[in-house]
Image (cartoon, coloured by chain):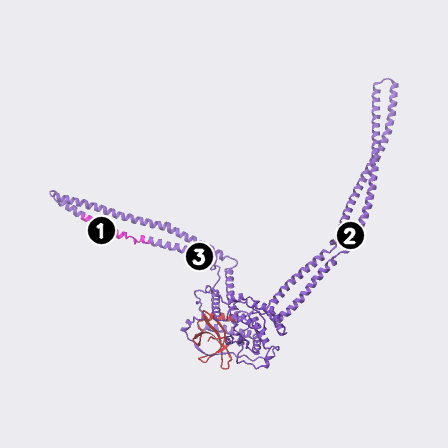
Amino acid sequence: MDNKLKVLWNLDVLVKMCRLKSDGPSLRVEELEITKQLEDFQQEINDIKSISDEESYDSSAEMADRNIEIITKKQLQTLTTSLKEKNKELNELKAEEKKAYESTSLLRETQESYEKYIFSMQDRISSVTDPDTINRYNDLINDTINKKESLIDELSEKSQDYEKIQNDIIALTDEINKLEDKIDKKRKLLTETQTNLGNKENYIDKTKKEKNNKRIAELEEQVEKINNRLEEIRKDPKYIETKIKDIINSDADPINAKPYLVDLINIVIRQPYINAPDDNKLEEELLKATQARDAFASEIDKKTYNILEANTPEKTRISFLETRIKKWQNEYEELQAKVSVVDQDQQFNYKEKEQQLSEMINIMQADLLEYEKAYQGTPDSNISLKASLKVSLDEKRDDIIEAEKIAAAFRRDEAEDIQEASHTIKVDCEKLNENILNAQKEIEKIRDRLLAKKSGLIDISSRNRDKEVLKDLAQTVIDLKHRRQFPETPIDVIKRLEEQLGITLTDSIDLNYIDETKEIESKDYNQYLTSESPKITTIQEDDVQELKRGIRVLTEDAIEQPETPPVEAEIPSYNDEPQTYDEEPPVYDEEPQTDEETNQNPDIIVDDNTFESLETPDQVDNIDDNTANLYEKVNVNDEKSDNIDENEAIANELDKYIEQIHQEN
Amino acid sequence: MSLKTNTIISLENNEKYVVLNETMYGGVKYFLVMGVDENKDIIPTNVAIVEEIIDGSDTYVDRVKDPELIIILTRILKSQI
């Protein structure tokens, strides 16, 4: 019994590692229902397939066609006979017609000969004078006229007969044509009927067959759907667990449980981080992931997702234009400063130079006057002095002219500088101004277009992308927190199960995958931290805390768990053996649906030290039956709905707390 | 020794709190605590968020007073409830 409980306990751990919401017994019931449903559907499909041809056969239609065939054949026979008779009749009429034609033709010829005869005799009378001859001719003419009249009567009669025969022929031909059409139609009908009779498919009710086929397709679709569900159920760890439990509880050979165990293990080892040991590295990864998640969540909170701030081509263009505007503005200011230097004569101090030169020239002119006075005052007799003064006087004049030229050169330079400054203002600054205005107009246009968007100003795609990233980060935290709940890795549990069941499991599981995933590959979380976010630190880096001291925690006591009677009657040893609550057994948290659900049910006794104490398989092996019972008991407590109300109350208190903080500030 | 949720902590100033929830923010662990009286009955109006400070083998708690931080932490803690 002990061994069985240990096996079941280890099995439970593996199943819990898969963190599922499903329920094994319910899945078994569902499996039964689905199997029954599957059989029903299959039966219906077979029934439809087997009876469809017989049911759909239209025998009355075949019978009708058989009758049509017989009747048509008989009709054809009658019609063909009739046609033959009519053709014979026609031939006789045609012979009669020929005779009548010949007869009338002969009469016409005779009539013509009579007329010619009468004409010739009348012609002759006009040229004969002998009365006898005339009389004879007249007699002949009268006689011939009489004959002719008689002939005409006969011809008229014969013509009428001929006409009648012709009409009869026409009528008979029509009749024959109609008869032939009728025979053609009947022959076609006979051919069609005989073709139908030759192919049985023609008498199958297509509408009924289509309906049946449609039903078969529907059923097959349902079969596929429930087959998929059946497959899902059979791959569900909770379902697999029930199968294994059945084998264990029935004391059957554990080898029968091996395929199920292998399936379960292959699911377990593929859970994120599950193969990594529960050590500081895992804690560190969790810390980093939590920080990244919170920092990113905070960042998202701050984001307005305003379309004008989103990373769009428009933003890129606006940013570029703004940079250019800034550059142009700087250039403009530089030019203005340059011009201002010229305007205020701060560049070369022309005014000062002009004054200096003016003073110098004045002095030189004063000197020149002195020289001239000296020259004028020197007697002509003193030729050498006069000559010397003359030279000095000329040189002074030249000096003054040169000084004037230099002053003019300065004025020219200043004029050039001023001209250049004017050019700078008129051309360069204007050009820059124009550039700035154009860029500003373009920015305005882009903004107007974005603001006019019907979908609003929210950059939905960016927001959704961020949500996805946050979801991934939150999922990582959930995965890590889930992993943290277990002091061991699946392989530790597997090895214990091997010993307890006396079977080898490691030969059928993907050990390479376990090796590859036992080291946590830390993700780059820094990308989710902003400059405002604190730098990710490791657990060891707690120097920040050195500066602060709060109130010392003297004791930390676990909340006492109210005693609960055993739930599973199938474990009888629970009541037989004394409970040892003092030695708190290992208890796993209810698997979290989200990371937020982890560690938040105050009703659950959670003692992390227990995990720490369970470092070796032997220690786990030593867990007594009470452990299993308590484990079950805690699971039941987890399901208490009271927590919902309690959590709501805490949430309300938190709201009040925030209000209070606001009021205090 | 780090604080754990679902425990009752007794402080040097004789106050007692039940540790309801924890979160990590900016590399610092914060706990949502609710006051309990001598009989270990919850005082619902006495809710606080405390920062955990570990100094060697001693653990200290410091009540968070920065309103902005409280709002952030409350948001995180509330989302976990």
User: Along the polypeptide, which appears first: circle 1 or circle 2?
Assistant: 2
Where residue A665 sits in the image (x, y, percent)? 44, 72
Q: CA distance from mark 3 to mark 1?
A: 58 Å
Few, some or many C-alpha atoms within 10 Å of disc 1 (few <14, some 14-19, many ≥20)? few
Identify residue type, mark 3: Ser
Where residue A347 sits in the image (x, y, percent)? 30, 53
- Contact between labelled residues 1 and 3, with CB atoms less than 8 Å apart: no
Identify residue type, mark 1: Glu
Residue B12's tag is none
Q: Is residue B19 left or right of residue A414?
A: right
Q: Which chain is purple?
A: A
Identify residue type, mark 2: Asp
Q: Quadrant of residue B11?
A: bottom left
- The mark closer to the camera, 3 or 1, is 3
For the residues beneath circles 3 and 2, the answer to whether they share a chain is yes
* Nearest the eye: A542 or A255: A255
The residue stretch that appears in magenta: A340-367
Query: Secondary structure of the magenta portion, mostly?
Result: helix
Q: Any magenta on residue B24?
A: no
- Residue drawn at point x = 28 percent, y = 52 percent: A348
User: Along the polypeptide, which appears first: circle 3 or circle 1?
Assistant: 3
Q: What secondary structure is found at the residue carrying circle 3?
A: helix
Tell me the chain of label 1. Answer: A
Tell me the chain of label 3. Answer: A
Q: Which residue is mark 2?
A: A65
Q: Is residue A504 left or right of residue A318?
A: right
Residue sticking out furthest to the top:
A130
- Residue drawn at point x = 83 percent, y = 31 percent: A102
Q: CA distance from mark 3 to mark 2?
A: 86 Å
Q: Which chain is red?
A: B
Residue A319's tag is 3
- The mark closer to the camera, 3 or 2, is 2
